[in-house]
Amino acid sequence: MLPVIIVGAGPTGLALALALAGHGVPSVVLDGSTDPPTSRLARSCVLAPDVARWGALPGAAREAAGWAGWRGTHRGRTVAHRAFEPADAPLHLPQHVLEATLRDAVVRQELVRMARGHRLTDFEQHGEEVLAHSVSRRSDGRPEESRQWRGRYLVGCDGARSTVRKLLGAPFPGRTAVERYAVAALRAELPHPGEVGLHRGLPVGEVTARPLTEGRWRLDWPLPADEGLVTPEALLQRVHGTLAAWHDGEVPDHELLDTGVHTCHQRLARAWRVDRVFLAGDAAHLLGALGTQQVTEGLRDAENLAWKLAVACREGNAERLLDSYQTERRGAVGRRLRAVDQALPLVRGRGGLATRLAGRGRGRLALLGEAHAGQGALGGPADYGNSPLNGAVTAASATRPGTPVTDVPVTALDGTRSRLRDRLGGPLLLVLTAPGARVWDARHWLSAGLMPELAAVAETLELPAELLVTEEYPGAGAHTLLVVRPDGQLTASLPGADQRALRETVHWLRGAPAPAAPR
């Protein structure tokens, strides 16, 4: 099998390589950099629950802080609060820790080849393959070495200045410097330990406090549009003013660990796929204003694309399936960017509705808190409700096709028990609701009712599938069968006994053309 060529070794590119390996697909990662990620605590990332598994890998887990809740305050008074269950809490960790963890996992993966120092210069598409050209720097100072790489597909995960995107000629419209933040990482005792806080009405204005591990925090202050260079003295004044406001006018003992200025852009590539070449991560989109999370969206790109590339590499004839990547992911990110554009005048503007919201405090906090609380258009999970891959709903459940499934306890056919989210990233999952399944020993119910027939059908479907059982699922009745994609999105909700509907659903999800009508 020819590998998938991945250009770029940031979080998106590395996660894509690992996700492909999970499907048994080899890849080559062209990493133009020879330097390790810079250790910057002021450059952290928040992983939403649906992609939090990447932050739970060995190495990252010890520095990933799971938040206990989100709190919004106005002039010191709590006006909004949401508690997080541990399984549904966002993870917050330094981005360099995530990158180092993913890189370590890639190095140990036999199906992934890392090409350090290789910078893409060009590519060609020929029939069933892509030919990539790269140059690499020599450590002894000799001229750069040229090399060619053959692959089945190529994915540009090479950042905002993407060479792949430029070679494709894909426009990258949008706006620059939509928001700017002064950022500081420090070790201190702050109010509401373990909770992300959005605080307005302080003498220094608005500040967001995000907890890290070991008593460390990241603080972000939005900068006025007319504020120029942020000097170290000005940033230190913000730190001291904020700490004093939380400690009755006194600046407590603290350790300043890192500072910086973060600029948020809004851009969306018009084309995410051209034949055998795809874009993902920063190469395809830029966001970050109002707490939206660029790394989370890049990881969603990787999970969405990986299983589709795996089907195409193994089975072929998957054009509709590959086209759905752009339809789903570009649509979801585009809606996120539009939500930011609509919210910015309300929370940062003056006059009219913005003035009324400021007077109440609560209205602005509700909008500003959406991304941090994982709610609404700014922070809710990816919604592929208009996906061409969505199947039928002939049995009720609380999850709509095209949205992430709820993480429930499940039992595999061998009796292994786990969480549904822990089973993602492999084959298609068929989840049957079977009340009493956790009470009875697996050997009793595996040979009873629908189980033998469903297990036999699962082995003959057009896509690899695994049958799981859950005691209950929100909104679903007994013997409801949920068809779950490898990236965690629900495809269909069916009666467990309807084998024909299951086969038709998987055929549709497979993306293969409909069979020709008999003559």
Image (cartoon, rainbow, N blue to C red):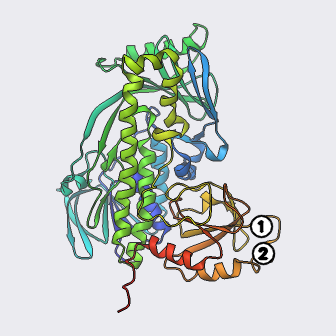
Instruction: Please tell me which residue is depicted at 53% across the width and 67% down the height of the picture.
Output: 426
Is residue 419 shown left or right of residue 24? right
Q: Is residue 133 above or below residue 224?
A: below
Q: Are marks 2 and 1 in contact (CB under 8 Å)?
A: yes
Q: Furthest residue to the front?
A: 519
Instruction: Please tell me which residue is depicted at 55% across the width and 36% down the height of the picture.
Output: 373
Quarter of the figure with the N terminus: bottom left
Residue receiving disc 2: 445
Q: Furthest residue to the bottom?
A: 519
Give whichever of 485, 154 is nearer the camera. Answer: 485
Is residue 128 shown left or right of residue 250? left
Residue receiving disc 1: 437
Residue type for callout 1? Ala
Instruction: Please tell me which residue is depicted at 48% across the width and 30% down the height of the picture.
Output: 367
Determine crowd level at label 1: few under 14, some 14-19, many 20+ residues with C-alpha closer than 10 A.
some
Q: Is residue 146 above or below residue 222?
A: below
Residue type for callout 2? Trp
How far from the left and from the top, in percent, is residue 194? 63, 32
Determine crowd level at label 2: few under 14, some 14-19, many 20+ residues with C-alpha closer than 10 A.
some
How far from the left and from the top, in percent, is residue 430? 60, 69
Q: Secondary structure at mark 1?
A: loop
Task: Give the distance between the C-alpha atoms of the residues marked 2 and 1, in whole angstroms.
Answer: 7 Å
Q: Secondary structure at mark 2?
A: helix
Name the quadrant containing residue 447.
bottom right
Q: Is residue 267 above or below residue 203?
A: below
Does residue 10 appear in the picture of this structure?
A: no
Give whichever of 397, 279 is nearer the camera. Answer: 397
How far from the left and from the top, in percent, is residue 96? 45, 43
Give whichever of 249, 320 is nearer the camera. Answer: 320
Instruction: Please tell me which residue is depicted at 24% across the width and 55% down the height of the picture.
Output: 164
Q: Is residue 190 above or below residue 408?
A: above
